[in-house]
Amino acid sequence: MKKSKILVVDDQTWVRRMLLEALEFHGYEVFGASSGCEALQLASKVKPDLAVIDMALPEMDGLTLLAKLKEIDLNLRGIMISGNGENKSAKKALDKGAFAYLVKPFDISRLEDLIKTALTSRDLHREENINELR
């Protein structure tokens, strides 16, 4: 079975490293980037299924990055993470196409549940598109 590819984008090295290790432990193929530009370069090569993106990144904010990643793959699912727990930020992220929004610090099992749900949603959407083409 093919491993799902997850791109983790966070400028805080310890957060990125912790997420990469936890997600790799759960059986995903993981890739890390510390900025939006680095993430875009990496995404064009590895074609991730899902991205976990910090809202506050150098060079471009997380929502701008999500939009650019969706230009590479419209079916990509994005889970936004932030230290900002304001409902306004979460609503904006969801309105801009994020699959989910998590406030740091969060429980890794919660992220794992969201990833599974997001990947299932992606697979179902792909199947619907294939069936429409037939």
Image: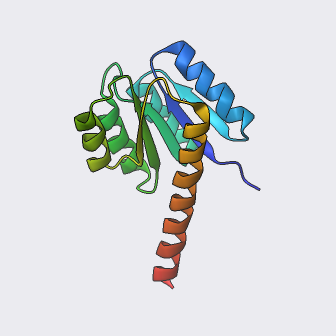
The residue at the far right in this view is 1
At a point 73% along the width and 41% down the height, the residue shown is: 27
One can see residue 95 in this view: yes
Decide if residue 37 is on the left or right side of residue 50.
left
| Above-or-below relation of 109 to 77 | above
The one of 121 and 103 positioned closer to us in this rendering: 103
Instruction: Classify residue 69 by image quadrant.
Output: top left
> How far across and down, in percent of the image, does residue 111 sit?
55, 38
Q: How many marks?
A: 0
Q: Position of residue 9 (x, y in %)?
A: 47, 28
Q: Is residue 48 visible?
A: no
**Residue 66 image offset from top left, x and y in percent:** 36, 40
Observer-nearest of 73 and 10? 10
Question: Looking at the image, which residue sits at the far bottom?
Answer: 134
Q: Please tell me which residue is depicted at 32% across the width and 44% down the height of the picture.
A: 67
Against 66, residue 119 (above or below) is: below
> Residue 105's spot in the image, x, y percent?
48, 23
Q: Is residue 90 left or right of residue 109?
A: left
Image quadrant in which the N terminus is located:
bottom right
Examine the rendered structure and indicate whether residue 20 appears above or below residue 6. Answer: above
Q: Name which residue lies at 46% across and 51% down.
A: 76
Q: How is the image coloured?
A: rainbow
